[in-house]
Image: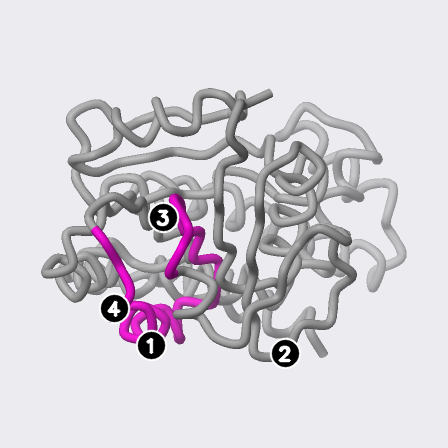
Amino acid sequence: MMNEPLKIAILGLGEAGSRFANDLAEMGVTVTGYDPNPVRELHPSVTLASSNAEAAKDAEVIFSVNLSSVSEEVAQDIFPVLKNTQFFLEMNTSSPDKKKKIDMILKPTGVQFIDLAIMAPVPPKGIKTPFLAAGEDVFAFLEKMKPLKLDLSLVENGKVGDAATMKLLRSIVYKGVAAVICEAVEAGDAFGMPEYIRKQISSIIGGNDDLIDRFVEGSKTHALRRMHEMEAVIEMLEERNLDPIVTRATRDNLAKLMN
């Protein structure tokens, strides 16, 4: 355990942010959080601030765990209080270009900007979820976080946006496969051939019914978050003049699962 508790701010206390806050508090970290509508139960030692800026002003490390749609607004909120001794972790599922834009917004403050991608669902492991980091200050960041023994990897010679790119490229595969499985299971049930279709799926993914069910249930449970994730993929691909036909279908399938 550290001699002096690390001071961490969590901006956004949804499913991921609240879990990170609770886990860090359990580890002895001094945690301050902010969310405009906090609804999840928090560890007794987590302090709720009245604004993003209040939460961030005295933190050594700032986790921004919001929706991509508000990430620029959050950056503007905390701009006046940031210092060059702080680390700002842009953890939202955004396109690489948006992460670069936020980096440029905050550049005048001197804050050490880290593009930090969450590389797996948060609920199973919480703060021990695998993270991928990129940015000029990544080595200083890894040293800062070393006492917490997190699952942190870095993009070698990576710049801001590179971690986001790798996460979203991976999402094309994982979320696309999940969408195909969801549609296949639905079709198999509709035609009265559920066992047959599951056998076909298993022949491809090398799994069993439990694995298939995890794909289906995971897509339903996290449909809203994953839909936003695929929107970020679409934005990234269109920025490269690619036509994300399959990714749009994956996004649409997730939207259907929300109904």
Q: Magenta stretch?
A: 57-83
Q: In this view, does 82 lie above or below 69?
A: above
Residue at the spot of label 3: 89
Q: At which x and y percent is residue 168? A: 37, 48
Q: At which x and y percent is residue 10? A: 51, 56
Residue at the spot of label 2: 37
The CA distance from mark 3 to mark 2 is: 21 Å
Q: At which x and y percent is residue 133? A: 33, 35
Q: Which residue type carries mark 3?
A: Leu
The CA distance from mark 4 to mark 1 is: 10 Å
The residue at 53%/71% (across/down) is: 252
The quadrant of the image that shows the N terminus is top right
Graded by Cα atoms within 10 Å as few (under 14), some (14 to 19) or many (20 or more), the crowding at tag 2 reads few
Q: In this orientation, which residue lies closer to the viewer: 123 or 90?
A: 90
Residue 73's disc is 1
The residue at 79%/40% (across/down) is: 198
Which badge, 3 or 2, is on the more N-terminal residue?
A: 2
Residue at the spot of label 4: 79
Left or right: residue 99 versus residue 248 is: left
Q: Which residue type carries mark 1?
A: Glu
The CA distance from mark 2 to mark 1 is: 16 Å
Q: Nearer the viewer, mark 3 or mark 4?
A: 4
The CA distance from mark 3 to mark 1 is: 15 Å
The residue at 48%/44% (across/down) is: 7
